[in-house]
Amino acid sequence: MNNEYVDLRSDTVTKPTPEMREAMAEAEVGDDVYGDDPTVNKLQEKAADMLGKEAALFVPSGTMGNLLAIMAHCARGEEVICGDKSHIYVNEAGGMAVLGGVYPHPVANQKDGTLRLEDIRASIQPDDSHRTITRLVCIENTQNMCGGVVLSVDYTKQVGQLAKENGLKFHIDGARIFNAAAALDVDIKELVAPADSVMFCLSKGLAAPIGSMLVGTKDFIAKAFRGRKMLGGGMRQVGVIAAAGLISLEKMTGRLKQDHARARNLYEGLKQVSGLRLEAEPSSNMVYFTLADRITLSENQIIDEMKKYDVMVDWSAPRQFRLVTHYWVDDAGVEKTIKAFAEVLK
Ligand code: TLP
């Protein structure tokens, strides 16, 4: 691997593979706002087909994909039930409220990443003119801030059933849904079948430089298409980027188990390092841990010290770190990281 650093800050740091760069250089393009870009059209068809939905839309980022989904499902003044540790609630700058006029109704994420069904049920607003109107329930799979945990097919079905019974729409923030499907060893179609819409990212573990996909019914995607224009996300000759996304879907989805195995190796190695308290064994590509009380170095000092060993890490909360494995982290990188932590914290 030709990277100078072992970069574990996120899987968002993945650079395009040489094969992607070649495909990008050769991509056929057209004006995608006219629907004329053949490479984008191919990517959208492939994404819809792989996830078993009617249609798909290529969008610049996961954040925009989630926002478009919320705005397509909900009118202003309506409400979304979502996790209190979900990306859409914590990490999207309040976009649903600021830009969509949509009200988030947070429900506690359990340690296993789920929202308890009884909590979702209890959060649905009664038909009362004092209240907002509950329109959408959203889950995240894998659930980033709960350790990258994977939510099961069965749980997803139960949320889908609950949503249906109560006339709600159901969206999955599946930024890393291919990681979830790989960890569960299931066809992704089965995992997302209960959802009305899914957003997933090409730019994380799937290593494309830019881009996410939104999938759902034709009508839903037509609304999202209009919303994307409104938000300034119409991207013209964007086949040059979609070409990388096609390789993500064709080649990168099949290798994610390697990243999960490396995350487990990293976890096992770091467990032996004095000064670190490891959290639950990783079920996908994220390793979370906290610093033991005896460690007096600050988070930023640790980051700087690790850089001296050519390892880049980031903290996720006070005294907590998150390391993410991906295509550009190999076995040697895992070993190097474990050794560097042992040196820095000794
Ligand atoms: N997550 C990033 C940071 O924003 C925290 C990361 O490093 O993990 N949904 C989920 C579950 C995400 O983790 C992210 C990005 C997004 C949506 C947003 O995707 P982008 O960055 O493409 O807008």
Image (cartoon, rainbow, N blue to C red):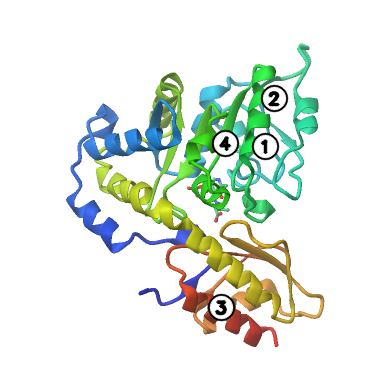
From where the camera sits, is residue 57 visible?
no
Question: What amino acid type should be assigned to the residue bearing mark 4?
Answer: Ile
Are the residues flagged by discs 1 and 3 in contact, CB closer than 8 Å? no
Residue sitting at x 49%, y 47%: 178
Q: CA distance from mark 1 to mark 4?
A: 12 Å
Closer to us: 129 or 2: 2
Specify whether tag 2 is near ligand 1 (CB below 8 Å).
no
Residue 172's disc is: 4
**Residue 5 spot, x, y in % from top left:** 45, 76
**Residue 268 spot, x, y in % from top left:** 65, 73
Q: CA distance from mark 4 to mark 2?
A: 14 Å
Mark 3 or mark 2: whose residue is earlier in sequence: 2
Specify whether tag 3 is near ligand 1 (CB below 8 Å).
no
Residue 13's disc is: none
Image quadrant assignment for residue 163: top right
Question: What amino acid type should be assigned to the residue bearing mark 1?
Answer: Tyr
Are the residues flagged by discs 4 and 3 in contact, CB closer than 8 Å? no
Q: Residues within 10 Å of mark 2 (few under 14, many from 20)?
A: some
Residue sitting at x 30%, y 48%: 241
| Badge 1 element | helix
Residue highlighted by disc 2: 162
Closer to us: 110 or 127: 110
Mark 4 or mark 2: whose residue is earlier in sequence: 2
Question: What amino acid type should be assigned to the residue bearing mark 3?
Answer: Thr
The reply, left or right, for residue 77 in relation to residue 319 is left
The reply, left or right, for residue 65 in relation to residue 82 is left
Residue highlighted by disc 3: 337
Q: CA distance from mark 4 to mark 3?
A: 33 Å
Residue 155's disc is: 1
Mark 4 or mark 3: whose residue is earlier in sequence: 4
Q: Is residue 306 above or below residue 134?
A: below
